Image (cartoon, helix red, strand yellow):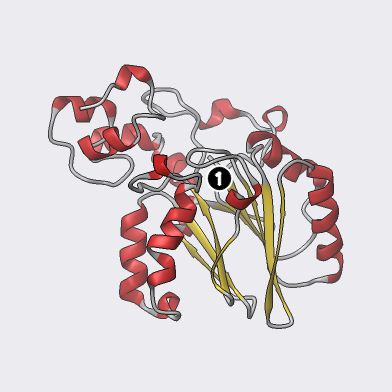
Amino acid sequence: MCIIILNTKGLIPKTTLQACAINNPDGAGMMHAYKGKLETFKELKSFDLFYEYYSNVRKSFKGNIALHFRIKTHGTVSEKNIHPFFINRNLAFMHNGILDVEDYEKTELSDTQLFNERILKRLPKDFLRNKAIMELIETSIGYNKLLFLNNLNEYTIINEKAGLWREGNWYSNYSYLAETSFNFDDYECESCGKILFSDYEIEEGFCTECLSKYNQTCQNCDEILTSDYEIETGYCEECLNTWKEYLPKSYGVL
């Protein structure tokens, strides 16, 4: 599922970030803006090394720090697929979710990297200030979340309400909590009993999958579901075929 954290103040406890790493074990990355330049750091294997770097930066830096812990969906488990990714030298971003991209099986790049290469890097440099472009991005990514940070320490979050703010920090989901300290029974879907991770799901009382079935829309791209089989699975025909490698075998393909 991955998790993004926007750390606006204070040092996040090591135990909290360690839970993020355990729940999302395929690489950790961070970014912050310092003296008009975006600085990034990525670590594939050692959580202790990552936390040491983060804590040293946090102790001397008072601005925004963005953190990301990855769990693989598309692409290889490698440093090159660890977030953040540069859109240009003054803007980088992190992603939480699964993006619908074509021909992902032909490359070692993640869905996030492909989205960056094919879409974000081709947009005008000031696209974050263009309301029409931002609305199109938000519509196209569905329930995914994107966090952008520029070289002036300014951040933008798409689908911010699908995450949660706690003590001045924004988390894209609840995977920063260890199971031992979080009562999952309080956040179960009223229909299927699955754990609810976002504030949006908790507010509605249902998981994204059940909400999509109730509304008869694809839980990935929000397209209207037309056949009984699409409604049963919660995905449109295109997404079912695109994601056939990752969906349960019982789903099959259309």
Residue at image mark 1: 173
Q: Is residue 222 left or right of residue 74?
A: left
Q: Front-most of 126 and 76?
A: 76
> Quick check: 232 above or below 66?
above
Residue extending furthest toward the left: 226
Point 55% across, 30% down: residue: 186
Q: How many marks?
A: 1
- State the image coordinates of residue 147 (x, y, percent, origin top left): 53, 62
Q: Is residue 148 visible in the rendered structure shown here?
A: yes
- Quadrant where the C terminus sits is top left
Q: Front-most of 48 and 59?
A: 48
Point 60% across, 44% down: residue: 70
Point 51% across, 54% down: residue: 95
Q: Front-most of 21 and 188?
A: 21
Residue extending furthest toward the top: 250
Q: Is residue 121 left or right of residue 233?
A: right
Q: Residue type at mark 1?
A: Asn
Callout 1 environment at 10 Å: few (<14), some (14 to 19), or many (20+)? many
Q: Is residue 65 visible in the rendered structure shown here?
A: no
> Quick check: 231 above or below 15?
above
- State the image coordinates of residue 31 (x, y, percent, origin top left): 68, 64
- State the image coordinates of residue 175 (x, y, percent, origin top left): 61, 39
> Quick check: 88 above or below 143?
below
Residue extending furthest toward the front: 106
**Mark 1 element type:** loop
Q: Front-most of 84 and 138?
A: 84
